[in-house]
Image (cartoon, rainbow, N blue to C red):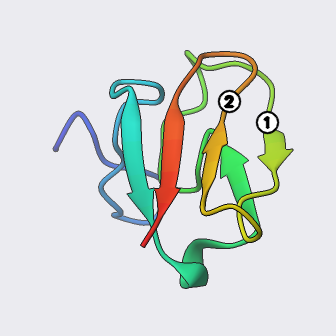
Amino acid sequence: MNPRSGNVDEILIPANAQNRYHVRSSDLPLSCPMPGMYLWNSHPKVYMPIAETGEAKCPYCGAQFELL
């Protein structure tokens, strides 16, 4: 079994492992941690407005998000 697999055979990525993430409009509404990330080692979920400026920064972990 893949140690990074999720509940329904999905591959999850470590939360807050990168400092910069590129997101698409299909990822909105934007939250950190994002869906598809492990939650056991992360901070509480926070939603960030990114549609107006195209950029957002998580107040918990400092991850920067850029809308493509």
Q: Residue furthest left?
A: 1
Secondary element at image label 2: loop
Residue 14 falls left or right of residue 30: left
Q: Residue furthest bottom?
A: 26
User: What amino acid is labelled 1 in the image?
Assistant: Lys
Question: At 60% across and 63% down in the image, what residue appears?
Answer: 54
Secondary element at image label 1: loop
Question: At 62% across and 39% down in the image, what residue appears?
Answer: 33
Which label sits in the foreground, 2 or 1?
2
Question: At 46% across and 25% down in the image, what residue appears?
Answer: 16
Number of on-image labels: 2
Residue 14: x, y in percent?
Answer: 37, 31
Residue 9 against residue 63 in the figure, above or below: below
First in sequence: mark 2 vs mark 1: 1
Residue 43 falls left or right of residue 21: right
What residue is shown with label 1?
45
Residue 30: x, y in percent?
Answer: 70, 59
The answer for how far apart the CA atoms under marks 2 and 1 are is: 10 Å
Residue 46 falls left or right of residue 1: right
Within-10-Å neighbours for mark 2: few <14, some 14–19, many 20+: some
Q: Nearer the viewer, residue 32 or 36?
A: 32
Residue 20: x, y in percent?
Answer: 38, 37
Q: Nearer the viewer, residue 25 or 8?
A: 25
Does the CB distance between marks 2 and 1 fall below 8 Å?
A: no
Residue 42 against residue 36 in the figure, above or below: above
Residue 9: x, y in percent?
Answer: 34, 64
Question: At 48% across and 55% down in the image, what residue appears?
Answer: 66
User: Residue 52 falls in which quadrant of the image?
Assistant: bottom right
What residue is shown with label 2?
58
User: What amino acid is labelled 2 in the image?
Assistant: Cys
Quadrant in the picture for the N terminus: top left
Quadrant in the picture for the C terminus: bottom left
